[in-house]
Image (tube, rainbow, N blue to C red):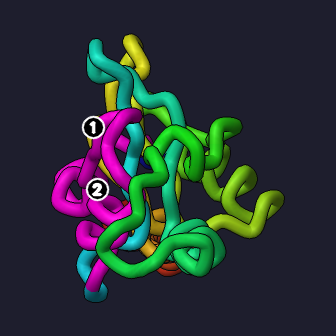
C-alpha cells in the first residue's frame, strides 16, 4: 500500500495559495485556466484556513462588478476543509474523496501548512498501481515463478 508521500511531487505542482485578506478577483486569476482547480487560503503564519474553488468564484463573482470586486478571500472560502497529510494511506484518502464527492484535496504538513493539492486521479492511479502489483504477485505465485 502506498502513502500520499509517494505522489506528493505531482501534488506540489498544483499548489497555489492566497492570503486570507487577498481579493476574490486575485483568486479568480489564479484559477483561470486548467492548471489550478483549487486555491488554498492561508493566514499570516502560512497555515491553511480554507480553500476557494472555481465554483466558489462563479457563485460569488455575480455580486461583483468586474475588476472592482473587493470581496476578501476569507469571505468566500470554504472553511471546513477535508485535507490529508503526506503520511496518510491512499485508501483512506480515497474514502474521504468518494464520501464527500471531492475532486481535489489539500495536503498539509503537521503544522497545517499546505504542501500540495491532491487530485482524485492521482489517488486512483496510485491505488490501481497497487492492485496491479498485487495481481502480478499472485500470478507469479500461482505460476510458481521464482520457486523450485
Horizontal side of 35 relative to 25 (left or right) equals left
Image vertical order of residue 64 relative to residue 123, above or below:
below
Give, as a single range, the part of the protein colored magenta: 3-32
Horizontal side of 1 relative to 46 (left or right) equals right
In this orientation, which residue lies closer to the viewer: 94 or 40? 40
Identified at 72% across, 51% down, the residue is 96
Seen as rendered, the residue at the extreme bottom is 33
Main secondary-structure element of the magenta-colored stretch: helix
- The secondary structure type at the circle numbered 2 is helix
Using the rendered image of the protein, determine whether residue 143 is visible from the camera's viewpoint: yes
Location of residue 97 by image quarter? bottom right
Horizontal side of 79 relative to 112 (left or right) equals right
Identified at 34% across, 68% down, the residue is 68
Image vertical order of residue 67 relative to residue 97, above or below:
below
Check if residue 66 falls in the magenta segment.
no
Q: Residues within 10 Å of mark 1 (few under 14, many from 20)?
A: many
Identified at 40% across, 34% down, the residue is 20
Identified at 43% across, 29% down, the residue is 48
Image location (x, y in percent) of residue 27: 34, 61
Image vertical order of residue 88 relative to residue 46, above or below:
below
Q: Circle 2 is placed at which residue position?
A: 11
**Real-space Cα separation, disc 2 to disc 1, in angstroms:** 8 Å
Q: Circle 1 is placed at which residue position?
A: 115
Asked if the residue under mark 1 is in contact with the one under mark 2, i.e. CB atoms within 8 Å, the reply is yes
Amino acid at each position: 500500500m502506498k502513502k500520499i508521500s509517494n505522489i506528493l511531487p505531482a501534488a506540489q505542482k498544483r499548489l497555489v495559495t492566497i492570503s486570507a485578506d487577498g481579493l476574490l478577483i486575485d483568486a479568480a486569476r489564479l484559477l483561470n485556466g486548467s492548471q489550478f482547480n483549487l486555491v488554498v487560503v492561508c493566514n499570516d503564519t502560512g497555515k491553511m484556513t480554507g480553500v476557494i474553488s472555481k465554483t466558489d468564484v462563479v457563485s460569488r463573482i455575480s455580486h461583483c462588478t468586474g475588476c472592482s470586486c473587493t470581496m476578501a478571500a476569507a469571505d468566500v472560502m470554504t472553511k471546513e476543509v477535508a485535507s490529508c497529510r503526506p503520511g496518510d494511506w491512499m485508501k483512506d484518502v480515497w474514502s474521504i474523496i468518494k464520501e464527500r464527492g471531492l475532486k481535489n484535496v489539500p495536503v498539509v504538513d503537521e503544522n497545517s501548512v499546505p504542501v500540495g493539492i491532491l487530485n482524485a486521479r492521482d489517488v486512483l492511479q496510485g491505488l490501481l498501481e497497487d492492485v496491479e502489483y498485487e495481481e502480478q504477485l499472485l500470478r507469479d505465485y500461482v505460476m510458481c515463478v521464482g520457486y523450485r
